[in-house]
Amino acid sequence: MKNIDIVTNIVVCNYNELNDDQKKLVDCAKEACSRAYAPYSHFNVGAAALLDNGEIISGSNQENAAYPSGTCAERTTLFYAGAQHPNNAVKRLAIAAYKGNDFTATPTAPCGACRQVILETEHRYNTPIEIILYGTEKTYIVTSIESLLPLCFGKTDLE
Ligand code: THU
């Protein structure tokens, strides 16, 4: 018997330390929060994806009275990107959340289902996605979903 230690690297910084391209994507994610449809949770999440052609796609959570029928900001964004731009890899993804009367102080991390969809997007285009999780007090950056989803199940498991 032996142990496996899994190490995850997360850069902790604040908004001012991001470069201009990262700031721009975070700004798009923050702006997308205003278009969330979240009458049940009142938790407005925005996501923005940078494509390899430079285009930015944004999306927000869209809830439903039948709760499971709603979807998260990350999946809204990545499915829209895939539907509209099937030949463009996603290079970077920013996520922000607005609760009460401000953006969250700590970063909002994607739920398990969204992590799986981000993983599929990385595998689909064979391109790692830098993920920026915005918070007013601190922001996290990871260079790939593998940092948030170790021991993952992906398409290679089916081959
Ligand atoms: N939500 C997201 O859109 N993304 C996340 O990363 C976490 C949760 C949404 C789903 C639901 O509309 C609301 O936030 C509360 O869970």
Image (cartoon, helix red, strand yellow):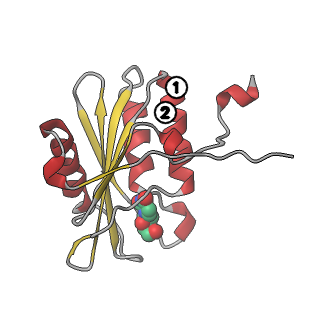
Q: Secondary structure at mark 2?
A: helix
Which amino acid, by three-letter code, is at mark 1? Arg
- The mark total stands at 2
Q: Secondary structure at mark 1?
A: helix
Instruction: Determine whether 65 is above or below 84 in the image.
Output: below
Closer to us: 99 or 144: 144
Instruction: Determine whether 40 is above or below 72 in the image.
Output: below
The location of residue 128, given as percent across then percent down, is 44, 29
Closer to us: 52 or 107: 107
Judge from the rendering whether residue 85 lies leftward or rightward of residue 103; answer left or right: right
Q: How far, Cα to Cα, is label 2 from label 1? A: 5 Å
Q: Are marks 2 and 1 in contact (CB under 8 Å)?
A: yes
The location of residue 100, given as percent across then percent down, is 26, 80
Q: Which residue is under mark 2?
A: 121
The location of residue 132, given as percent across then percent down, is 32, 47
Q: Which residue is under mark 1?
A: 124
Residue sitting at 41 percent across and 50 percent down? 74
The location of residue 151, given as percent across then percent down, is 66, 42
Residue sitting at 53 percent across and 38 percent down? 119
Residue 63 appears in the picture as rendered: no
Q: Residues within 10 Å of mark 2 (few under 14, many from 20)?
A: many
Which amino acid, by three-letter code, is at mark 2? Thr
Closer to us: 138 or 62: 138
Closer to us: 25 or 57: 25
Q: Residues within 10 Å of mark 1 (few under 14, many from 20)?
A: some
